[in-house]
Amino acid sequence: MTVYLVGAGPGDPGLLTRRGEELLRAADVVVYDRLAPRALLELARPDAELVDVGKAPGDAPMTQEAINALLVARGAAGREVVRLKGGDPFVFGRGGEEAEACITAGVPFEIVPGVTSAIAAAAYAGIPVTHRRVSTSFTVVTGHEDPTKGGSDTRWDVLANVGGTLVVLMGAGRVAEIAKALIAGGRDESTPVAAVRFGTRPDQHTVRATLGTIADAGVESPSAIVVGDVAALDFSWFERRPLFGRTVVVTRAREQTSELRARLVALGATVLELPAIRIVPIDFTVPDLAGFEWVVFTSANGVDAFFDRGLMSANLDARALAPVRIAVIGPGTAAALARRGLRADLVPERFVAESLLDAFPAGTGRVLLARAAAARDVLPAGLGRKGYEVELLAVYRTEPAPADPDALARLRARGVDAITFTSSSTVDNFCDAVGAPLPDPQPSVVSIGPVTSETARARGLCVDVEADPHTIDGLVEALVRKLGQ
């Protein structure tokens, strides 16, 4: 039984430490508040108890004393408890109070440091808190002290003359008062100031001003306020990414989302997952492959299902495919095959069924077509016309996924810039779930290929851009062309 006070970092889930991730994945109980990135909760076990203690300004569902008692009670009950805290637990995070509560109760605890916003928010805004030619030190101070202390121990007149960079956390509500005190203490009113709101998050926003003008610059909470000559430096990178500030809906099945989501997030987008379909495994038996000339795969899902549920259940492996040639549609399917140690014999220039038919040689043998349970008849019909006997093997099926009410609400609130579709089924199921019309103006519709585009238009959507090539990479490139800054 241990209570782990884990620093979650300032907002970017990628800034969580490896130790923090390890503990979060193993925790029985996760206690979190508004400053901890919600995406990190996906790392928790499905059966873990998740406790939201809020801690928003003026709205705390649980007092700090109640949080302390909760941590002690769960820890004393033999549970592995992660207290997930924004930033670092010991940098204005009240981690000290929670550690004291554990010591008093005799509950073992561990501190897992996190990346503090005092440094990270400035870095993501392109501001180094130290620079050899500008500032050789920095001081971190809170702008919001405990009101029950009966007084302040922050000497703004001293801080005004300490030199170097001053970073003020939790000071947005008192920025005018703080600036006035620093000027009165001797800091020049022309001293550069930068306020980084929601630092490291997709909605990060940086306000640049001076001590004399920051009071009227519209600084909002939560912001890290950087005071000093370094605040005039602008090595911006985070806010200059091509999709920064854009929100993109991903309609792929949740099982397929990771690659596309990672690409979009790396380009600065906020990804709203609204899976229109889900992949459902089905039972099937792989026939004797010695009787076939070709095996055709139409998707990476088909490859994975064929190997994981078909060959494996028959105690076979990739060697079972030695007698046949293999054709695939698209590099994604070819890559899934390569992960199994096999190379496709035929990959068409364009990644649609019609292009595969154009490239397929005429013949008289048998073809095994491994695909979804419900799919277009273009391939089997076309291969039949080329002289082949086609056997269909359904290796998985797709079905509509229930729509997330929160994601639907955001979509309808016009908070979305683009919607991506990677198949006709995602179009149909999305339209069935969302209904019509889409918010006006309609978010940009980005399609992976002509078949998907045709379905979208048939459902009344205006396709703004189509991927070329018809791959995830092509889809991302098309999105950047449409929305990129």
Image (spheres, grey):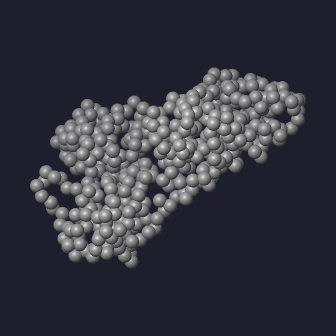
Residue 473 in the figure: left or right of residue 287: left
Q: In which quarter of the image is the C terminus?
A: bottom right
Task: Measuring from the top left, give residue 279's x and y in whole percent.
Answer: 59, 30
Residue 232 in the figure: left or right of residue 419: left
> Residue at left 32%, top 36%?
51
Task: Measuring from the top left, give residue 39's x and y in whole percent.
Answer: 43, 43
Name the quadrant containing residue 296: top right
> Residue at left 38%, top 66%?
208
Q: Quadrant of the N terminus?
A: top left
Instruction: Look at the image and tell me whether residue 425 can be seen.
Output: yes
> Residue 311 or 177: which is nearer the viewer?
177
Residue 292 in the figure: left or right of residue 340: right
> Residue 313 or 434: which is nearer the viewer?
434
> Residue at left 56%, top 49%?
263
Q: Which residue lies furthest to the left in this view?
A: 150
> Residue 201 or 90: which is nearer the viewer?
201
Residue 483 in the figure: left or right of residue 106: right
Does 103 sit above or below residue 207?
A: above
> Residue 168 or 197: which is nearer the viewer?
197
Does 310 sit above or below residue 250?
A: above
Instruction: Look at the image and tell me whether residue 248 can be seen.
Output: no
Q: Residue furthest bottom?
A: 133
Task: Measuring from the top left, give residue 24's x and y in whole percent.
Answer: 38, 41
Q: Tally the numbered discs.
A: 0
Does 174 sit above or below residue 52?
A: below
> Residue at left 20%, top 55%?
145
Task: Measuring from the top left, give residue 34's x and y in whole percent.
Answer: 33, 44
